[in-house]
Amino acid sequence: MGEIASQLPTDIEALHALVAVACAERDAAVAERDQALLQNDRLRHLLRQLQRAQFGRRSEKLDRDQLLLGLEDVEQAVAGNEAAEDKKDPVAAQKRADKRRANRGALPAHLPHVDVTIEPEDTNCPCCRAPMHVIGEETSKRLDVVPAQFRVIVTHRPKYACRACTDGVVQAPAPERLIKGGLPTEAMVAFVLIAKYAWHLPLYRQAQMLLAQGIDIKRAVLAFWVGYAAAELQPLWLRLREIILTSGKIAVDETTAPVLDPGRGRTKKGFFWAIARDDRPWGGTDPPAVAYTYAPASEALARIAALYAIEKTIRGRSADQRRAVRGAQQASRDGTQGLVRAAARPRLGQGHHRRGHPLRLEPLGRAHAVPRRRPHRARHQRR
C-alpha cells in the first residue's frame, strides 16, 4: 500500500484525472461483466432446452422445429444487444463489421446483378481543378430482394486522381447500411420480417425457401437480421406509443393469440394489446395510429402469488387480526384491486350468449346466489 501511495501524483488535478480514468475503466468492466452474465444466462437456458430435447422423457422432448423456434429467440436477443453496443462503441462496431464481411460467404453467380455506381460530387482536381480519371474502385455486394425474385446489388465507388498532382484522391463515401458489414439490403431485411410476422413463416422455413433458389443463408443468420432490425425499430414503436397515449381519446383492444409451448405438444394463450386512436369520424385532424404490445398474461398469477404470501404470514390468527394485517399491507390491496380490474375486463371476440358475458362483480352485500346443481341420484331418476 505504501508503494502505491508513493507512486500517486501530488497534484490535485492529476489525481482527479487519475480517478476519472479509473472510474471509466470500472464502468466499462462492469458493463462487460453484465453483458457476459446475460449471455451466460441465455446459454444456460439453451443448454437446458437441448438437454431436455436429447435426454428428457418422451412427453417432454421437443420437436426439432420447436427447438429451432426457441433458438431464434435467443439469437435475436443477442443480435439486439449487439446492435445497441454498435451504437455505443464505433470501434467495436467496426471490428464486428469486418468480421461479418469476412464470414458472410459468396452469393450465387446466377442471381441478377444490379450495378450502382456512386460518383463523387466533384471529379475535378481540388488543387488545379483539372478533370481527374478513375484509378480504381471499391466494390461490395449485398443480397437484395424483389417480390418472387432475388438479386445482387453491386455498388461501385470509383476513385479519382489527378495525373498532374500526387495528392488529392477523391471517392464518394460508402452509403449507410442497416447492418454494417452485413450481406442484406434494407429491402431484404424487411422481406424476412414480413414473412415471419405477417405471413407466419418461421425462419427455418424461410432458410429452406432461400436454399431452393440456390441461396444458402442459415437460419441463425436470418435470426440475427430480425434481432438487429427489431432493435432499430424499437425507438419508432416507443415514440408511436407515446404519441397515441397523449391523445384525447384512445381505444384499447385485447386479443388472444395461440403461442407455441415447447415441451407440452400444444399451444398456450398469449395476449396482444392494441392501443389505437382515430378521430376522423368526429372531425379530428390527427392521423390514425395503432401500436401493439404482446405479453404472456402472467400478471394475474403474480398477483395471486403475492396474496398467498401475505395469507401465509397470518394463518392461524383471529379474523380481526387477519383483517387488520390485510388492510395494512399495500401489496394485498394492490393485488386485490388488480385482480378485480382483470376480472372486470370484458372478454372480446365473444357473443352475447350466457357463457360469453364478462364476469360481473358485485358488492358482497348484493352477491348473487349460485343455483345448486341437482344431486347425482336425482339426475339419474329423472331419466
Image: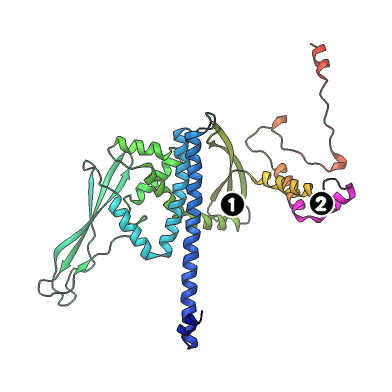
What's the residue at 50%, 56% (across, down)?
37
> In the rendered image, which residue does mark 1 sit on?
279
Q: Give the percent coordinates (x, y) of residue 276.
A: 58, 49
**Quarter-of-image position of residue 349:** top right
**Quarter-of-image position of residue 174:** bottom left
Mark 2: few/some/many CA within 10 Å (<14, 14-19, 20+): some
Q: Give the percent coordinates (x, y) of residue 62.
A: 49, 34
Specify whether residue 58 is painted magenta.
no
What's the residue at 36%, 39% (across, down)?
207
Name the amino acid type tagged 2. Answer: Arg
Q: Nearer the viewer, mark 1 or mark 2?
A: 2
Name the amino acid type tagged 1. Answer: Asp
* Disc 2 secondary structure class: helix
Q: According to the image, what is the colour scheme of the structure?
A: rainbow
Foreground pick, 302 / 113: 302
Q: Which stretch appears magenta?
A: 317-334
> In the rendered image, which residue does mark 2 sit on?
326
